[in-house]
Image (cartoon, helix red, strand yellow):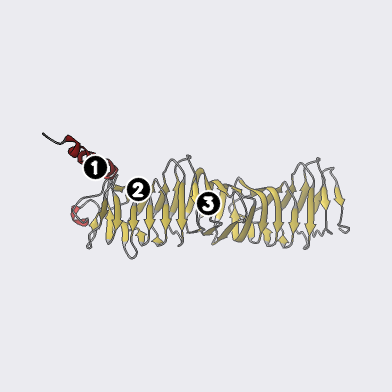
Amino acid sequence: MKNHFAIAPINLILGLFFVLLAPLIGESQIVSAPAGGLWNVSATWVGGSIPGAGDNVTIASTVSVTAGSQCNNITIQSGKVLQNSSTNYYTLVVNGSLTNLGTIQNAAYGLTINVNGNFSNSGAMTNISLNFTGTSNQQMAATQPLQVSSFVRTTGIGRIKATTNLNFVGTAINLGLDTLEFTTGTTLTMDGGYLTSGVIFKSALPAFQLTAGNNAYVNFLTIDAPQTVLTGTLLVQSNNIFKNNLINNATLKSHPNNYFTLNVDGNLTNNGVIQNGTYSFTINISGNLSNNGTWQNDNTVLNGSGNQNLAMTQPFTGIYFTKNQTTGRAKAITGLSFIGTQIDLQTDTLEFTTGTTM
């Protein structure tokens, strides 16, 4: 008589094994061969399998991306290289996450990488374009500068979440009307390039710091953080709104190609320099104004709907100073010093509280 009860546990164990194995099918780990080569050539890969959309890939040599290249997660090992084939521009589609410990670069033409998952860079990245194409939050970490020509967020679903400081060199950053949120990261550095079309968000202190230089500028940008600190030299183009408390330790000025306005929806403390570019620079301030540096742009407008405090330890040398709302008052809490400035209160009141001298 057959022992069906002895066979049953074996079948159960085998069934459980195949259930656990099933998720791994179609998500294999493929490693590049020591000699490297073109992505679409089987000899480039250990075992001869060319990676597909569901395969995890490790670059352990030098691999050149070709037409139709794609994978799930990808890791570029330290000292190894991912680039485009030198015959044309090519794009790698990363359906999962990208981790770069090595080098990602252009070869003759240019390499574009589309990433749907998270991104981490602790190597060198100098390729032509990095696109975030995911439809949910994408975490971004970079311990080394990103020198890609362009960085684009292509969807408006989810956010980019910076878990480290970010440093871009010569990069055109387009947030695609989406949000770059700094969570554990606090600082964005721009050495050249520009930042456009989106929101920088930080929910709590410490302050968000934007460091700029080499003619870096912002355009159609909202910064929404409890406190923002500017350092370096930042150029301003159109439709920028900086919210809450803005501390300027930088040289802040308009981009030289036209007249531009910065809207400060909150308080502005100047410890640096505020000045015109080639043309006129206007700053609208809805909160308090404090000047401890050089303030010499054409137009400064107090446009808040409530009382706005004024404090100056250094002279204000801008051309026009205007209060354009009749609700609330301008309240001097220190002495005020203006040099060559046309002051227009537009029928409103300048009240000296703890300040006594003008």
Q: Earlier in the sequence, mark 2 or mark 1?
A: 1
| Place of residue 108 in the rendered image (x, y in percent of width and height, measured from the top left) | 31, 58
Q: Are the residues tagged 3 and 2 within 8 Å (C-beta)? A: no
- Front position among marks 1 and 3: 1
| Place of residue 348 in the rendered image (x, y in percent of width and height, measured from the top left) | 84, 43
Q: Which of marks 1 and 3 is nearer the N terminus?
A: 1
Taking depth in this image into account, of 208 and 163 the one nearest to the observer is: 163
Q: Mark 3 points at which residue?
A: 195
Q: Mark 1 points at which residue?
A: 13
Mark 1 closeness class: few <14, some 14–19, many ≥20 residues within 10 Å: few
What kind of residue is marked 1?
Ile
Instruction: Give the total number of marks visible in the rendering.
Output: 3
Q: Is residue 303 left or right of residue 46?
A: right
Residue 153 vs 340, above or below: the answer is above
Q: Residue at x 45, y 59 (%)?
A: 146
Farthest-out residue, left: 1
Report, in whole angstroms, how far the alpha carbon at label 3 lies from the one at label 2: 24 Å
Q: In this view, does 295 lie to the left or right of 16?
A: right
Q: Residue 327 carries which label?
A: none
Mark 2 closeness class: few <14, some 14–19, many ≥20 residues within 10 Å: many
Q: Are the residues tagged 1 and 3 within 8 Å (C-beta)? A: no
Q: Mark 2 points at which residue?
A: 94
Report, in whole angstroms, how far the alpha carbon at label 1 lies from the one at label 3: 56 Å
